[in-house]
Amino acid sequence: MSHTAPRRAWLRGLAFAAAAAAFGTAAPAAAQQTLKFGLAMPLTGSQSSYGKDQVKAAEWAVADINAKGGVNGKKLEMILLDTQADPTVGISAVNRLINVDKVPVFVTAWSAVVKAVAPIANREKVLELSIGANAPEISKLGDYVYTAFPLADVDVTAVADYTFKTLGKKRVAIMYINNDTGVEAARLYRTVFEKAGGQIVAFEAYDPKATDYTGALLKVRAANPEMIHLHGLVADMPLVIAQMRQLGIGQRVTTYAAGYNPQMVEKAGKGAEGLIVTSLAPNEKQNPNVGPYLERWKKAENRIPNGLPYTQYLHDAPYLVAALYSHLEKNKLPASGENMRKALLAVRTFDLPLTGKLTFNEDHTVRKPVNLVTVDNGQFVPLATVE
Amino acid sequence: MEYVYSVLVMIGIYTIMASSFNLIIGFGGLISIAHPIFFALSAYASALVNLHWGVPIPLAILLGTLFAAAMSVMLSLPSLRISGDYLLIASMGFQLGFVEVIKNVDFAGGAGGLTGIASIYSGPSRSPAFVVTTLTIAATVVSVVHWLTHGEYGRAIRAMRDDEECFASLGRNPMAIKITIFAVGSALAGLAGALYAHYFQFLSPEQFGITQSALILTMVVVGGMGSTWGPVVGALLLTALPQAITFLNLPPSVMAPLQGMLYTGLVLLFLFVRPAGLVAKRLGQ
C-alpha cells in the first residue's frame, strides 16, 4: 500500500492537470472573432464587495457596447478573473490572462496587485491599465503600466489645499491606516499642507487589523488640531470616526474617495456630519449619464453601488478598451500589447460616458477635477470642485 | 506556455517550502507556524542586497538563505526551551512581529511592498530556465530532507521527537538537534523565498501572514506529515487545484465559496478519510 499511494496521488495530480488543459483549450476556440481584454479584480475575500460592484459596472458596459454593434461589428469580450486583492493570486490571474487567454490589454486594481503584476506586463509587452488603485508609485512601474485613475496626489493635494486655503485651518492632525493606502497618502498630505504653510500637529498610524483606536485618538485629542485628516479604508474609517466622537473629539474630518460611500454615514451615524470626502468622478449634475446609471443600480440591485466613483471608472474601462481597439482596427494594426500601448499614446484623450474626458499624461497618470462632497443631515451634498 | 511555467515555478517553490516545513513539524515535531516569515526575511534580504549594494543575484540568494538560518536561531534559542502549544504561540508572535517590522521599514518598501527587484534570468528563455532551476533545487531539497531524516541523524531526530527525556538520558543534546533542524528548515524556506523574489520581482509584507502559514500547513497535512513525498504531493495538489478551478469558468457566486472552502474542506476531508495524508508514512519511520 505504501508503494501505491504516491503513484495514486501523482495520477490524481495528472488528472487535474489534464482537466485544466481540456478547459484551457476549449475556451479560446469558442471565442473567435472577438476583441478580448482581461479584467482582474477581487471577487472573493475581504475586498470583494467593492470588486464585485465594479465588475458589474464593467459587465454592463460590455453588454451595452456589444448591443450597439461592438467595435467595427466585432464583439468585445471581457475575461474576468479573481485576484482576491492578493498579489500572489493576482500574478496567477494575470499570467493566465496574458498567456492562456492572450489578451493584449488588461484592467486591474488594488495597489499591491497592480505593482505585483507590473513586471509581467512589462516583460510580456501587454498593456496594463490600473483603474482604482491610487498609490503614487504606480506611475513609475514601467513602460506598459498606465493608470486611468487619478493617483493619491490628485485628491489628497486638493483636500489639503482646500483645508488650508478655503477653510483657513492651520493646524491639522493626520490619522492613517498603516498599509500601502494610508502611508504614502498621509506623507503626501503632510508635505502639501506644510508646504502651504500649515502645521501637522499629530501624525498617527493605526494597524489595518485594529478595532480599537483609542491610543492614537488620544494623542490626536491632546494635540488639539483644528481639523483631522483621516486616511483609511471603508471598513475601518466609520469605526475611527465613531470612537473619535465618543472620546469627545468633535473636529471636522476630511478624507478621500473611499469615504464617499453610503456605509460611512450608515455606520458612523451622526459622527459623520460635516465629513468632507472627495469624488474623482462627476456627479449627477455634472454628467447627464450618471443619473440613469444610478437608476440602473436601483432597478437591478435596489441600492447604490459600493464606492460609486470607482464603479464609474470601471464602467468606463470597456469604453476605453473599445476606443483602443477601434484605433487598431482603423489603422489595420494587429491586436498586440505593443500596438495597444501605441494606440493609447496616439489617442491620448478619451471621452468616456460616466467620467468624462480622460487625458493620459507623459508620466503615465491622468488628472481629473476633484469634487469635494460633504455630509449634511446624513446625505452627501456637493461642497466644491477643485480643478 | 508562460502560464504553465509560472505554475511549475510555484509548484517548485511550494515543494521547497512544504518539504522544509515538514522537516520541522513532521520529523522534528516542533509545532511552529513561523515558516513563511523565514521565506519573507530571505526574500527581502536577497532583493535588498542586490538592489542597494549590487551584490550578484546568486550570491544574494545565498546571503538571504544564510540570513534566514541566522534569524531562525533568534526564534529557536529562546523558544525551543518550550514546546507544544507555547512554541506555537511564540512562533506566531515572531511571525506577526516581523511582518509588522517589514511594514514599517522604508528601505524595504514598507507596507506598499518592494518593487523593482532584479530577475535572475532575462530574455525569451527566462521562464523555462527558472522552471529548470526551481525544480532542480526542489528535487535537491527533497533529497536533502530525505537524507537528513533517514540516516543515523534521522533516527536521532525521531528519538528526540518521540521522547525528549529518554533521548537526553542517552547523553544526546536535544537542544542542539532542535536548533539544527530549525535552522536547516528555515534556511531552505529562505532559499524558496529568495527564488520567489527574483522570479516575481515584487514583495509585499501582507503575503507572509497567517494565511500563508495555513496554506503550507495544509500542504503538509494533506500530503502526509512526516513522509518524504507527502509535502511534494501536497504542494503539487494545492498549487494546481486553485488554478484548475479557475478554468471551470464558474460564476463568482459559486467560485467565491468554493475557493474559500477549498483549504478548509481538504483539511477536514483528510482528517476524516485519510488522517495520515495522501502519502501515508511507512511503518517504522
Image: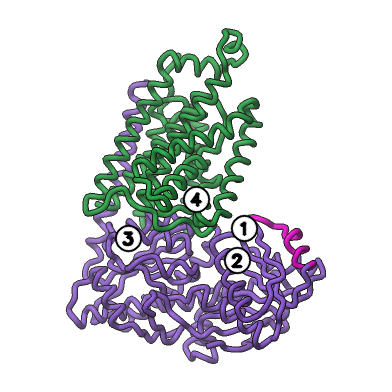
Identify the image quadrant of residue B87: top right
Query: Along the polypeptide, which appears first: circle 3 or circle 2?
Result: 3
CB atoms at circles 2 and 1 under 8 Å apart?
yes
**Chain identity of mark 3:** A
Q: Which residue type carries mark 1?
A: Pro
Residue at 26% x, 52% y is B122
CB atoms at circles 4 and 2 under 8 Å apart?
no
Q: Which residue in the protein does label 1 denote?
A: A208
Q: Residues within 10 Å of mark 1 (few under 14, many from 20)?
A: some
The answer as to whether the residues below labels 2 and 1 share one chain is yes
Q: Is residue A170 magenta?
A: no
Task: Supply the letter of whichever chain is purple.
Answer: A
Q: Which residue type carries mark 2?
A: Leu
Check the image and report above or below for B182 versus A85: above
- Name the mark on residue A97: 3
Q: Is residue A214 magenta?
A: yes
**Disc 4 versus disc 2: distance between alpha carbons?**
19 Å
Task: Supply the letter of whichever chain is green.
Answer: B
Label 3: which secondary element: helix
Horizontal relation, residue B104 to residue B7: left or right: right
Residue at 45% x, 34% y is B187
Residue B134 image offset from top left, x and y in percent: 32, 40
Asked if residue A161 can be seen in this view, the reply is: yes
Horizontal relation, residue A101 to residue A165: left or right: left
Q: Which residue in the protein does label 2 denote?
A: A233
**Disc 1 versus disc 4: distance between alpha carbons?**
14 Å
